């Protein structure tokens, strides 16, 4: 799948030198706030396959006639999306949060609030949904995670990179506040791993990581270049009771609970000593809403590390043994996942999030294990 070339005027390719001169002119004329005006952007993108009229103001979507926050979640049927929808519906009202995916929702999700088909690779479909539903905030959760991404690189590239381009353009055109999650996987073997700060070398070696660094940079570029209200958190591995992980490297930390409750034993696909940053889903969803509601002036950056705890499979097994004395863990290492985990942060430095917008996690390892085991009905149902 390829992006169409950017064109200028009606269906006419903008010569490279002319385009560069125009962009350079806009840069020189930009205000000191570092946030460039939107009108030149309209001209620039008017030319894009997105079919924006040449004289349109890029932020024309802002006259929706209502201050009501109207939310779209893409890729909402994965591990995190349904929980996010439930969480946001408590805050903004059931009908103001639309869950979307390319998969068919189970009955209980379909009946719990608005659900719509949306393929992020279909730009016109995405735009139609945003316009018809007067969307103001977009949470972009569609992705192929680290392990499944390595198994299907062309699809991961399409969904994680081309899909992101569609989302960025629709968000910029319609003045949306846009949340895109990044990940510990956006770092690589040459990054400092213990701890990993917000700003350091990022040379990931998975298509997932590469696409997430691209998302961080493109989102920040759209923010500084076009004024897009882009907000991004780098999540650690997320642990949830009532939803299954979608094919990542940290999946073991969810599956261990399911297997411990069902069978009293677990075969782990990472080495016992593999330390990774992790977070319980309630903390993850709260961090996501908090950064979206943070006043713009409190955000010194647009992409933040967030963290809660850091543990190895052995640490987690020891904590489980306190509750299930007969629990047994064995190891059968998956070389692909192990190589990925060995290149990721062991501890995550999230001091900027804590300083700028007051991030504070609630769940450490003991609370995580107690809460997951107390949710055993939900864990069993998710099997
Ligand atoms: N779960 C974690 O531990 C974790 C950690 C860090 C970051 N994240 C990020 O959070 C987001 C959500 O993660 P998740 O665990 O729920 O992922 P997931 O893999 O469980 O779900 C992703 C969803 O995207 C959908 N999707 C795939 N192709 C699509 C397309 N063309 N159009 C629309 N939807 C499509 C899938 O159907 C799936 O439901 C992702 O961006 C992920 O990178 C997750
Ligand atoms: C860490 C995160 O991005 C995801 N759970 C993965 O392992 O791929």
Image (cartoon, rainbow, N blue to C red):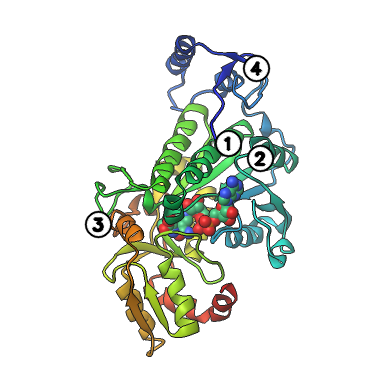
Instruction: Kindly check if marks 1 and 3 are in contact, taking CB atoms under 8 A apart as contact.
Output: no
* Residue 328 disc label: none
Label 1 neighbour load within 10 Å: few <14, some 14-19, many 20+: many
Please provide percent x and percent y for residue 74.
60, 49
- Quadrant (top left/top right/bottom left/bottom right) for the N terminus: top right
Of labels 1 and 2, earlier in sequence is 2
Pair 1/4: label in front = 1
3D distance between C-alphas at marks 4 and 2:
21 Å
* Residue 194 disc label: 3
Please provide percent x and percent y for residue 240.
50, 68
Of labels 4 and 2, earlier in sequence is 4
* 325 or 270: nearer the viewer: 270
Quarter of the rendered structure image containing ligand 2: bottom left
Q: Which residue is mark 1?
A: 166
Is 110 above or below relative to 300?
below
Q: Is mark 3 within 8 Å of ligand 2?
A: no
Give the structural element (helix, strand or loop) at label 4: loop
Please provide percent x and percent y for residue 162.
53, 37
3D distance between C-alphas at marks 1 and 3:
35 Å
Give the structural element (helix, strand or loop) at label 2: helix
Pair 1/3: label in front = 1
Q: Which residue is mark 2?
A: 126
* 88 or 73: nearer the viewer: 73
Pair 4/2: label in front = 2
3D distance between C-alphas at marks 3 and 2:
40 Å
Q: Which residue is mark 4?
A: 54
Give the structural element (helix, strand or loop) at label 1: helix
3D distance between C-alphas at marks 3 and 4:
49 Å
């Amino acid at each position: 799948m390829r992006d169409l070339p950017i064109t200028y005027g009606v269906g006419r390719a903008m010569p490279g030198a002319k385009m560069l001169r125009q962009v350079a002119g806009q840069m020189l004329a930009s205000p000191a706030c570092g946030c460039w005006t939107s009108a030149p952007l309209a001209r620039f993108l008017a030319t894009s396959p997105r079919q924006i009229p040449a004289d349109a103001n890029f932020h024309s979507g802002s006259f929706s006639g209502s201050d009501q926050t109207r939310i779209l979640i893409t890729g909402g049927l994965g591990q995190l999306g349904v929980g996010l929808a439930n969480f946001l519906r408590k805050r903004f009202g059931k009908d103001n949060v639309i869950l979307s995916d390319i998969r068919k929702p189970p009955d209980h999700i379909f009946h719990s609030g608005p659900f719509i088909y949306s393929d992020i690779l279909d730009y016109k479909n995405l735009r139609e949904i945003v316009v018809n539903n007067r969307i103001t905030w977009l949470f972009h959760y569609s992705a192929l995670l680290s392990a499944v991404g390595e198994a299907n690189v062309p699809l991961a590239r399409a969904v994680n990179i081309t899909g992101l381009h569609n989302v960025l353009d629709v968000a910029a055109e319609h003045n949306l506040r846009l949340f895109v999650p990044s990940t510990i996987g956006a770092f690589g073997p040459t990054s400092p791993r213990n701890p990993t700060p917000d700003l350091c070398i990022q040379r990931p070696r998975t298509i997932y990581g590469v696409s997430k660094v691209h998302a961080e940079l493109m989102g920040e570029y759209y923010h500084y270049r076009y004024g897009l209200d882009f907000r991004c958190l780098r999540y650690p591995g997320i642990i949830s009771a009532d939803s299954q992980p979608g094919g990542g490297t940290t999946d073991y930390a969810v599956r261990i609970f399911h297997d411990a409750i069902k069978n009293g034993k677990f075969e782990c696909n990472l080495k016992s000593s593999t330390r990774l940053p992790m977070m319980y889903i309630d903390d993850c969803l709260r961090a996501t809403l908090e950064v979206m509601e943070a006043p713009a002036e409190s955000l010194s950056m647009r992409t933040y590390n967030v963290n809660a705890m850091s543990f190895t499979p052995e640490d987690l097994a020891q904590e489980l043994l306190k509750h299930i004395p007969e629990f047994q863990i064995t190891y059968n290492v998956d070389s692909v996942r192990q190589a990925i985990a060995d290149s990721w942060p062991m501890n995550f430095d999230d001091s900027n999030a804590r300083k700028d917008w007051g991030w504070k996690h609630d769940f450490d390892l003991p609370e995580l294990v107690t809460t997951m085991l107390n949710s055993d009905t939900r864990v069993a149902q998710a099997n």
